[in-house]
Image (cartoon, rainbow, N blue to C red):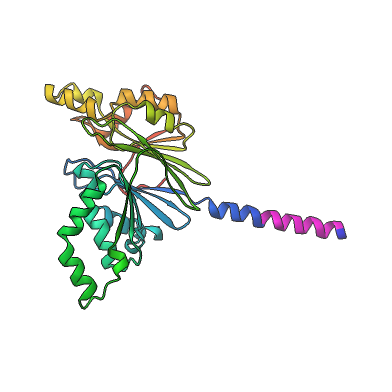
């Protein structure tokens, strides 16, 4: 009888531990915007979120970032409610990746974010932030000291210029940055996010990168930009010089994926260059046998 009670107690304890572990295994990748500077109304500007244990970690802030996050919150991801946007990681300072920066600073503040926005990005992000805050200083003053009685902390931005290695860590996540090559940009970063149950690597904008291959080893999900190699053949000589210097071709990405072997390869910032998105995907699948998908706005993995 006593042994039976011990067995039951042990089984109950196992279930409690198992359920606690499962409850912590909640990491989600949410694509907020998968677009490029091309004004495709179906695709907002580059941005995604890593969501774990009720906290969100935003990467890049292209046009529409806050409203895409709000749409994701309507799909049940409370961490992406506007007032909960508190952490931002910026890969580089191209306009299509940062036009939404004032939006993610001010819209959550207006909607009762009570804490400063913490921003981690390359050298230059402090100067960009300084000028944004200066441009909106009258708006900030009226919202805080006027009839709205806004929360002053919500309008603060703590900016951290980072280089490589571990740049952020809390009880949910460890974030590592690494340098990538993106044409003429002196500072361009990729990020590796490690949680209890997933490792997600984000390329940012870049061409073929050995640093990315090294830092993406053993990842569950690799989110990578891409352009169609077939499509490039139809473009001008200027385009043929530009795209390979700034971006990653389908052939190069297949090579990267074959070396990294992610459980899932997610394409974002897709540049078909006159081809279809399906044909772009097919170009990779010919040379890469793993699981690969065309990312779309508000897709969740």
- Image position, residue 198 (x, y; %): 49, 43
Would you say the magenta stretch is mainly helix, strand or loop? helix
Q: Quadrant of the N terminus?
A: bottom right
Q: Is residue 160 left or right of residue 274?
A: right
Quadrant hosting residue 12: bottom right
Q: Nearer the viewer, residue 281 or 17?
A: 17
Asked if residue 256 shows in the view, the reply is yes
Q: Quadrant of the C terminus?
A: top left
Q: Is residue 73 above or below residue 60?
A: below
- Image position, residue 10 (x, y; %): 75, 55
Q: Which residues are magenta?
A: 3-15
Q: Nearer the viewer, residue 155 or 82?
A: 155
Q: Is residue 4 magenta?
A: yes
Q: Is residue 185 above or below residue 81?
A: above
- Image position, residue 130 (x, y; %): 21, 54
Q: Residue at x 24, y 72 (%)?
A: 144
Q: Is residue 222 above or below residue 167?
A: above
Q: Residue at x 21, y 44 (%)?
A: 96
Q: Nearer the viewer, residue 171 or 24?
A: 171
Q: Is residue 106 left or right of residue 119?
A: left
Q: Residue at x 21, y 31 (%)?
A: 184
Quadrant hosting residue 71: bottom left
Asked if residue 289 shows in the view, the reply is no
Spot the residue most to the right: 1
Spot the residue most to the bottom: 147
Q: Is residue 210 above or below residue 76?
A: above
- Image position, residue 72 (x, y; %): 34, 56
Q: Is residue 42 magenta?
A: no
């Amino acid at each position: 009888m006593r042994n039976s009670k011990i067995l039951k107690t042990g089984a109950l304890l196992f279930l409690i531990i198992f359920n606690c572990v499962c409850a912590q295994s909640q990491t989600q990748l949410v694509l907020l915007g998968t677009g490029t500077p091309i004004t495709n109304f179906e695709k907002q500007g580059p941005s995604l979120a890593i969501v774990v244990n009720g906290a969100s970690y935003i990467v890049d802030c292209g046009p529409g970032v806050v409203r895409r996050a709000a749409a994701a919150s309507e799909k049940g991801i409370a961490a992406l409610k506007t007032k909960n946007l508190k952490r931002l990681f910026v890969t580089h300072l191209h306009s299509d990746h940062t036009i939404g920066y004032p939006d993610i600073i001010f819209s959550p503040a207006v909607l009762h974010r009570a804490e400063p926005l913490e921003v981690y990005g390359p050298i230059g992000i402090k100067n960009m932030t300084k000028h944004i805050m200066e441009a909106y200083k009258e708006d900030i003053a009226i919202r805080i000291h006027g009839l709205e009685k806004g929360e002053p902390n919500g309008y603060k931005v703590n900016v951290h210029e980072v280089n490589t290695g571990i740049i952020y860590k809390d009880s949910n996540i460890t974030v590592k940055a690494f340098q990538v090559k993106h044409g003429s940009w002196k500072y361009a970063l990729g990020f590796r996010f490690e949680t209890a149950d997933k490792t997600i690597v984000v390329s940012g904008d870049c061409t073929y990168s050995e640093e990315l291959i090294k830092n993406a080893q053993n990842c569950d999900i690799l989110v990578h930009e891409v352009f169609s190699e077939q499509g490039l053949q139809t473009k001008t000589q200027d385009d043929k010089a530009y795209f390979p210097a700034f971006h990653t071709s389908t052939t190069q990405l297949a090579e990267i994926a074959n070396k990294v072997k992610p459980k899932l390869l997610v394409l974002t910032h897709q540049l078909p260059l006159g081809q279809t998105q399906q044909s772009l995907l097919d170009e990779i699948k010919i040379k890469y046998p793993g699981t690969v998908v065309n990312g779309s706005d508000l897709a969740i993995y």
